[in-house]
Image: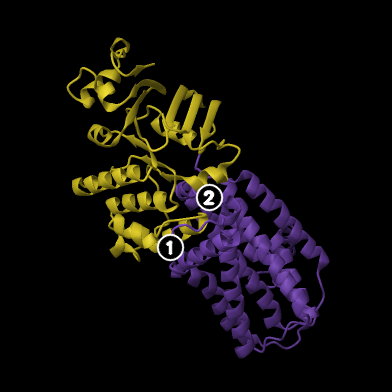
Chain colours: A yellow, B purple
Amino acid sequence: MNEIVVEMTNISKRYGSVLAVQSMTLRIARGEVFGVLGPNGAGKTTTVECAIGLRNPDSGTVTVLGLDPAKDPDAVRQRVGVQLQQAVLPNRMKVKEALAIFASAYARHGDPAQLLEDWGLTGQRSTAFGALSGGQKQRLFIALALLGEPEVVVLDELTTGLDPAARRDTWALIEGLRDRGVTVLLVTHAMDEAEALCDRLAVIDHGQLIAEGTPDQIRGEHRTLEAAYLHLTSPRPAARTLQNGQIR
Amino acid sequence: MSTSTVAAPNPLATLATLTRVETALLLREPAAVLFTLALPVVLLVLNGQVGNDPNPRFGGAGAIDVLMAGYLVYVMATSAIMGLGETLADYRDRGILRRLRVTPLRPWQILSSHALTHLAMTVVGVAVLVGLGAVAYDLHRPAAIGATVLALFASAASMIAIGFVLGALLPSVRTTQAVAAAIYFPAIFVSGALFPREVLPAFAQRIGDFLPMTYAVRSIREAWTLGTVDWVGLGILAGTTAVLVLVAVRMFRWEAR
């Protein structure tokens, strides 16, 4: 296996009485497109937030690109790009202004004009954030996540709000990232997306890792990945035994 | 645009970019800018007829000179207390700060860009009012320029610190608006920002003794009309600024509860 760029060992995170993440261990190699699947409220977002140092876990260790995000957050943020679920910018901020602010924060960054072209926003350069459509906002946040030419990109609910054509275009651009050796952490509900893009998957439910492996391994004897996923995340505990892939 | 600038970004260049964009955002809210400037301009026009001759009621200073010190603080207070606190609370409530947090931007850069934006707004407001006063209402030159600039700066800093602490401590935009208004409206009346304190009842003057805004008006007025440095007033403003900025930075939260 290649160099490990994200390493979480025995991570637990509690919010009040809710144990959001429970003894999670994940290792993600450089250049992988790694999918995090799970039902709503399963702990996916908390898991990736811990992985990039946005949250400090209550216990366990996290290493990103060889760095401890709690101790060296600036160095991590220079090299990790993040697209958050439900992100917003000030309504009156123009697209080009958002790019200017983000570009000014990174030691090196890509060409904003090229990114706007890649993400179909060239015509929206001077459009205020509040006047963008849902899909345009989503694409802007993906572009902003990639602006700092990150080595690791976290994409949370990547294609939510995109129309089918934009979704396919987005997949093609993720393939492009993989070709450039960028490590991608993809949080998703969409089975077709996970199957099309991901080299490996982690299925999370109730804050626990319940399966990890390639899409083929996760699918196992089921006809589709979705069937395997529904089986894995079914409320009946007995159903949570998987024949293939890595079982936790 | 370069694709591989190796050097780390200059933190001050980043701050300059943030400040430029924040200022542009503020100017896209013309209602806020007008509300800040319109009232003191109208009051200056309405009160301008009294003239600026030495007046024993104001210790020998002219009425316009005395009013001007208050109006300048009014502009600072409106921009910082009513504007800054709400902007920070709004950025947090809506998740804007959450998004900025995952970039290499630092909290001090974000807070400083807001402070500088409101400082720039204050400079423009001061220039408009002083310009109008000088051209139309015989406003006198400050008796001591250096002391006046010092008092203006200390006053603006203390008002920005109040805005910071409101935006940092209060849990939501609505609460911030309500608390800011509850502080701001009584304060502009009893501090001497809208009317010289001499015209207020003794009880109102007593309350004013406890407000930093009162010392902002007083230190500017003394420097402008008498050419003296109000060390006590400046000390209170500097102390207020230091304590409130410390509290704001300590209590600063990226996300709504």
**Left or right of B92 in this view: B54:** right
* Residue A61 visible in rendering: yes
Image mark for residue B104: 2
Vertical position of residue B62 compared to residue A45: above or below: below
**Left or right of A100 in this view: A186:** left
At numbered mark 1, what does the secondary structure look like: helix, strand or loop?
helix
Instruction: Give residue A196's position: percent from left, percent from top.
Output: 24, 36
Q: Nearer the viewer, residue B89 or B140?
A: B89
Q: Residue at x 30, y 59 (%)?
A: A117
Q: Dot 2: few (<14), some (14–19), or many (≥20) neighbours within 10 Å?
A: many
Please name the amino acid that badge 1 sits on: Glu
Question: Which of the two discs, 1 and 2, sits closer to the camera?
Answer: 2
Q: CA distance from mark 1 to mark 2?
A: 17 Å
* Residue B82 visible in rendering: no
Q: Residue at x 78, y 80 (%)?
A: B144
Chain containing mark 2: B
Instruction: Give residue A65's position: percent from left, percent from top.
Output: 50, 38
Task: Say which quarter of the image contains residue A40.
Answer: top left
Read off the residue under disc 1.
A97
Please name the amino acid that badge 2 sits on: Pro
Vertical position of residue B102 compared to residue B4: above or below: above
